[in-house]
Amino acid sequence: MEEKRLQPRRFLRVDLDLVEGDHILPVYSRDVSQGGIFVETPHPLPQGTEVFLRFNSPGRSEPIKIRGCVVDSSRKSGMGIKFLNLVDEALDLFENLENFEGRES
């Protein structure tokens, strides 16, 4: 299978809220790149579903909210989400986390 990713992925385990409409689903990230994130969930959403990822960041009173779109869905493990508006605060946080600086996956 041909690799479709443009940026390298990094292991990152973070608690997130995945918001789709009025539904909030707690999920865990598995890995992240500047282009997207893979989240673990036993209930992945269909490809093309637009979502928001919401998470807390140290030193911020308001959670960071990133808009994304499900681009890959696996019934067994989770879903790949492409970032549609990666905010600077999230990019800075990802780049500065010790785990993000860890191994490529």
Image: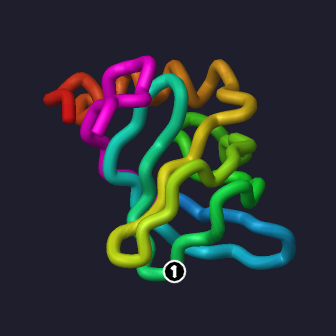
Q: Quadrant of residue 7?
A: top left
Image coordinates of residue 43 in percent, x first then y, are 51, 80
Judge from the rendering whether residue 88 lies leftward or rightward of residue 59; answer left or right: right
Coloration mode = rainbow
Q: Is residue 10 magenta?
A: yes
- Of residues 67 and 69, which is closer to you in this image? 69
Judge from the rendering whether residue 68 lies leftward or rightward of residue 31; answer left or right: right
Amino acid on which the number 1 mark rests in the picture? His
Judge from the rendering whether residue 2 lies leftward or rightward of residue 81; answer left or right: left
| The C terminus sits in image quarter | top left
Range covered by the magenta-colored residues: 1-15
Which residue corresponds to the image point at 51% horizontal and 54% vertical from the top-left? 72
Image coordinates of residue 95 in percent, x first then y, are 40, 20
Dot 1: within a 10 Å radius of its alpha carbon, few (fewer than 14), some, or many (20 or more) residues?
A: some
Residue furthest toward the front? 1
| The N terminus sits in image quarter | top left
Position of residue 32 relative to residue 93, above or below, is below
* Residue carrying label 1: 43
